[in-house]
Amino acid sequence: MAENGIGANVRRKEDHRFLTGKGNYTDDLNVAGQTHAYFVRSPHAHATINSVDTSAAAAAEGVVAVLTGDDLAADGIGPLICGVNVTSDDGEPHRAPVHSALAQGKVNYVGDHVAVVIAETLAQAKDAAEKVEVDYGILPAVTATASAADEGQQQIHDVAPNNICYNWPFGDKEAVDAAFESAHKISSLDLINNRMVTNAMEPRAAVGEYNSGTEEITLHLTTQNPHVHRLVMSAFNQLAPEHKLRVVGPDVGGGFGVKIFVYAEELVVGWACRKVNRPVKWTSDRTEAFLADAHGRDHVAHAEMALDENGKFLAMRVNTTANLGAYLSTFATMVPSYLYAFLLAGQYSTPLIYSEVKAVFTNTAPVDACRGAGRPEATFLLERLVDVCAEDMGLDPAEIRRRNFIPVDAFPYQTPVVQCYDSGDYNAALDKALALADYDGFAGRAEEAKSRGKRRGIGLSSYVEACGIAPSQAVGQLGAGVGLWESAQVRFNPTGNVQVFTGTHSHGQGHETTFAQLVTEQLGVPIENIEVIHGDTAKTQFGMGTYGSRSLAVGGVAIAKACEKLIEKGKKIAAHALEAAEGDIEFADGNFIVAGTDKAMNIAEVAFNAYVPHSYPEGLEPGFDENAFFDPMNFSFPAGTHICEVEVDPDTGEVEIVKYSAVDDFGKLINPMIVEGQVHGGIVHGVGQALLEGCQYDTDGQLVTASYMDYAMPRADNVPSFDVDYAPTNPPHNPLGVKGCGEAGAIGAPPAVINAITNALGIKHIDMPATPENVWRAAQSAG
Amino acid sequence: MLTVSMKVNEQAVSGEVEDRTLLVEFLRENLRLTGTHVGCDTSQCGACVVHVDGASVKSCTMLAVQADGCDVTTIEGLTNGAELHPMQQAFKDNHGLQCGFCTPGMVMSAIDIVNRNGSGVDEATVRKELEGNICRCTGYHNIVKAVQAGAKNMGG
């Protein structure tokens, strides 16, 4: 292993600037001549717009322009799009209402964008926004997921009868129904997957600049995928041709999915900076983030498992209603379909699965991917149902899982729901987690807690997820409008240092360090001489960005492939310089060596020769700079078992997590310190969903939880420290042997926590968030 | 407009502000000290914590005029050169940060916690006292470790 290479806990290269206040986030950027944008938002969940009078606002002090949907349409700026098709059960594509970045004639959720005021100062823009007079015709609102498609409900979009976006059945219904007919036992469960607000700590922001000389727009954005923003804004919104639009994602303060999407505000800033021919800056405040960031989850489901007399799963049947909000966000349609139903097999060999998903529109903020995206919903449903099965069969939760695990010798394993898992050893992770959690000692601890008036519970969650997104051909067949390869460029400079350009984007994951570790391992260049560059369409060749735990599993491989090309070229250069045959040159630890001799040449010298090719192989291009693209052959399938132990105070309903043990299979770890940090963060995201976070709209469509006073984020005193370990297997299709780790905690944690609470109280189910009130009520009725 | 004068990171500064200007706005917009962040609008997240006359303050809860004549330290003022403050170093050593957005507020709160509780501050106290700083990335595990390690470093 190279020093600071694969497997080393290298302290992060990016930390110094963050720790000294020298990070460069979008809102930190100020441009000469800059104006400020503030959006006039709908205070109503559902209303026609009878008129918008901007005259008083336009005349207010400092106002540069007040723009509406009519101005946007007049300039030919296209509506916001959803990039993935899902075919409904009538054979038609999903219903896609027009989503103008500034409303035209109607608003559909509180926070919907009606107009934008651009002024010299933010305070002036806010003051003038108060003067925009909008005459609304208020309509009844639809907010509840379960009843959104009921007969007689208020219709939101003409194109979507009964507020249905799609009905999407998947699986062999007849075979599944037949298996249920002859089952020894049927276990069933109704459950809700609570709506979350993603809440990256940095609110969204945009700074747009237009250069009238080059006719180029530069947009600094809080983005997880600058090239995707550029592509969509060019190809679908007609903001500017791709080569005249530069998107920069500088330091970004957390993503978790919410900064993947192309939103109204960012598009409007890009358009407005050209229209007013001044730089325009917009920064969301937290209230706006609650109102208008894409939300996550929000399912209502009924799940059933058919079992034989030994507790083996024979078939599973799931019916899900998923709330997509008022409009379709960029990837909304795929979250409760492909990213959800295709994970319903979990770690089990259930031979038959049938799923029906009804996706509905409501008068709420759009819903899209949030850390895990579909996979937490599938895992929560499955791992809760498995515990119900265990109870119904009188089996220990660990035992029923063991009886149904896909055995280690069955990989690659084709599930009945499309995915083919490439590697895994689910028993190994379970065994290690049981030991880490001291599962055998639980009864004693529960007894001791009882003596103090507390109730202890322990809960398991054995999850699998699909990430490393994604094989382009597979997602293309499913209806995605893009390929999901990744690209890299590894460039030596003549002085021997290295710049690595990646199409992924780091917003907390530590790519600047992890990717440098890959390169130092492969090329032998000291890590301090390697700089990883990302997030600027004018610097990096192309890329699809960071989400779906794809950066290392896809982007990292592209980097490794570019390094391989450099080594191949370097052998030719070294062979010429060392007067040896190319076939005799070996490369190790940064040196090209003539095999069996002490004749060698460092890679930095080779790079210098490539740029100063005075004596150089005939016909070989100068330069030491290689590109590579990588398109994975399969998803990757991280998996593991998480075990949560809680202590419940039945008098107050308070739940304390007393121990949390996680054993994951992420394949090979490049920087274990960073991986462990990703696990911790994911777990707390999941604990937040399980215990604290619940986004609530009232029946009028007002967002009741629109601040940190009302929406409970997990804080340091809500969680314990964690015990984390690994049970790796080697994914054969990934050249680096890596799987991805960014979402696992958020996927694994919610059922582990809830299973622990149901275990403590001896109840079948409790919905998330299991707040003290909900737990107290459950404890009282359980007796 | 009003004129305010104060000491920020040991430099005397003054500027013109509206009476509604918050201290954090004065720091970020007037002084361009953008290390202090704004993560919410209800004084909950703690990304804007600075020290005013030696005590931690959420700079979004204080008007710039209220800080007139005060001694303010921001994240930029913890270190002058390449050498990090012991608490900054502890955050780096313990991977106590990911996206970095909450980090300046966390570090400023952490130093204040140690100043008040001493170098042997225990985990429960650290967790309780960090209640006013929200992080979405780290799950707090490594932040808590970092604060305790930083406390030891600060204690010499």
Image (cartoon, coloured by chain):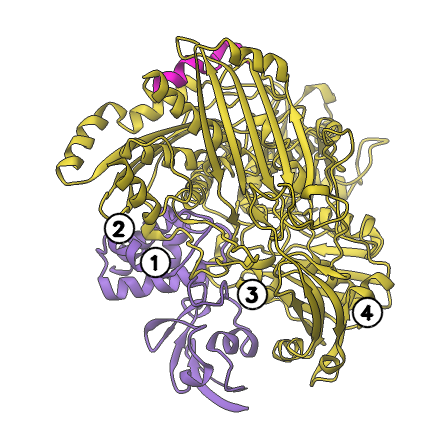
State which chain is coloured purple.
Answer: B
Decide: few, some or many residues near mark 1? Use Cα within 10 Å; few <14, some 14-19, many ≥20: some
Q: In the rendered image of this protein, which colour is used for chain A?
A: yellow
Q: Which numbered circle lies on residue A275?
A: 4
Q: Which residues are magenta?
A: A398-411
Looking at the image, is A431 positioned above or below residue A720? above
Q: In the image, residue A587 lies at what x, y percent?
A: 62, 26
Type of the residue with mark 2? Glu
Task: Give the mark toward the camera: 3 or 2.
Answer: 3
Can you identify the residue that label 2 sits on? Answer: B123
Q: Which numbered circle lies on residue A121?
A: none
Which residue is found at the position 57% from the left and 15% from the top?
A177
The residue lying furthest to the left in this view is A451
Alpha carbon distance from label 2 to label 4: 54 Å
Can you identify the residue that label 1 sits on? Answer: B131
Dot 1 falls on which chain?
Answer: B
Alpha carbon distance from label 4 to label 3: 24 Å
Type of the residue with mark 4? Lys
Does residue A263 appear to the left or right of A677 in the view shown? Answer: right
Q: Are marks 4 and 1 on the same chain?
A: no
Dot 2 falls on which chain?
Answer: B
